[in-house]
Image (tube, rainbow, N blue to C red):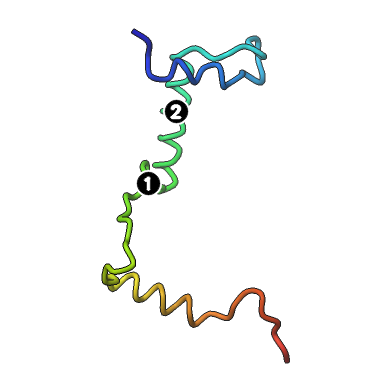
Amino acid sequence: MHAPCCGLLWCFTIKTGKNAGKNPSVASLYRALADAEDAATDHGLPLRPKPVRIRRPEDPLTPEEIDLRERLQSQPHPNTEIHS
């Protein structure tokens, strides 16, 4: 049985060092992913994306969606010219 990331190994190439030009091992790939997760948590970034609910047009807006819509509609359109 193969590790889930074995298919990804061929997508990556080591850029520097004595193994430059070769594909990384499964252990190296897992180590790199773990390092990236550690770096993300060090900077306060979420590890996983926040799940979202797909909203249908007939669904009522949440208070957060109402607030966002009002803030967006109150901003000037980015393509309008500002005349002084």
Nearer the observer, 1 or 30: 1
Q: Is residue 66 left or right of residue 11?
A: left
Residue 8 in percent (x, y) is at: 49, 21
Circle 1 is placed at which residue position? Answer: 49
Residue 4 in percent (x, y) is at: 38, 19
Q: Residue at x 27, y 70 (%)?
A: 62
- Outermost right residue: 84
Q: Residue at x 41, y 28 (%)?
A: 34
Tell me the SS state at disc 1. loop
Mark 1 is on which residue type?
Pro
Label total for image: 2
Mark 2 is on which residue type?
Leu
Nearer the observer, 69 or 33: 69
Q: Is residue 47 above or below residue 4?
A: below
Q: Quadrant of residue 77?
A: bottom right
Q: Residue at x 62, y 11 (%)?
A: 22
- In the rendered structure, which disc, 1 or 2, sits on the residue that comes first in sequence? 2
Q: Is residue 64 left or right of residue 13?
A: left
Circle 2 is placed at which residue position? Answer: 33
Q: Is residue 56 left or right of residue 25?
A: left
